[in-house]
Image (cartoon, rainbow, N blue to C red):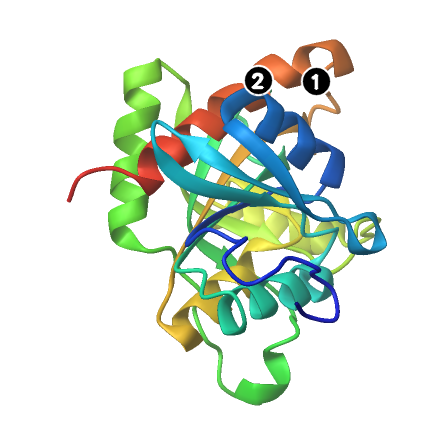
Amino acid sequence: MTVHIGAKDGDIAETVLMPGDPYRARWAAETFLDDAQLVNEVRGMLGFTGTWKGNRVTIQGSGMGMPSLSIYANELISTYGAQTLIRIGSCGGMQPHVGIRDVIIAMTASTITSPSSGIFKEFNFAPSADYALLEAAVKAAKGKGSTTHVGGIYSSDVFYAERPDLDEQMVRHGILGVEMEAAELYTLAARHNRRALAVLTVSDHLQTGEALPSEDRERSFGDMVEIALEAAFASP
């Protein structure tokens, strides 16, 4: 048990999926896991452990933003021994060829600042995904027929950003989408020698203003969860 996770020893699986929304964690656990049990509800940040095709999986909400995710990822790694951590969540599309409902598999995650920035000081660390997870996720996405993009994303430390000049440069340099957590997750995984990946569903688009209707979200997010699960347990 930690300050923010009330799970007992043995309650958390070595493989953890991390949506930002705790209610999405509950939906994913009820939809995709067998015998899912609630293992955490401290501060309403729900976590569930069950099995997928016989493999133990925990789905733990992370909250919004890198500071919140950093708390949960640190505790999952240091206290509960999590080995594979995969962020599953929504993002905003940034490139013209990236459409609503598309899946983005983040190879790298750029950021202006993160909770780990103070450690690096003047050094610009490049947070990146675990290659084996990345490769397995791409394969799984192709098997599902999902429209998938692989490349760099931007992890913002603010939701209501007002930097059109920055957006312009990110689009110019091929950034596929924007979210708020992956860069810190990748950094923590590197620090602790763990595997990490972000599999994201494009729910809105910064250039077109298009947004995914709420009634369509579960179906679209379902593909993302299945891709993450298949990647986590792919044979080497």
Residue identified by numbered label 2 = 220
Residue 77 percent coordinates (x, y): 50, 67
- Tell me the kind of residue under disc 1: Leu
Label 2 crowd (10 A; few <14 / some 14-19 / many >=20): some
Q: Residue furthest left?
A: 236
Establish if 6 lies above or below 173: below
Q: Nearer the viewer, mark 2 or mark 1?
A: 2
Residue 65 percent coordinates (x, y): 72, 56
Q: Residue 184 occupies which quadrant of the picture?
A: bottom right
Establish if 213 lies above or below 173: above
Residue identified by numbered label 1 = 212
Residue at left offset 42%, top offset 35%: 228
140 or 37, which is in the foreground? 37
Please indicate whether residue 146 sits to the left or right of residue 12 in the image: left
**Pointer 2 with pointer 1, Cβ within 8 A:** yes
- As measured in the structure, the alpha-carbon distance from the residue carrying label 2 to the one carrying label 1 is 9 Å
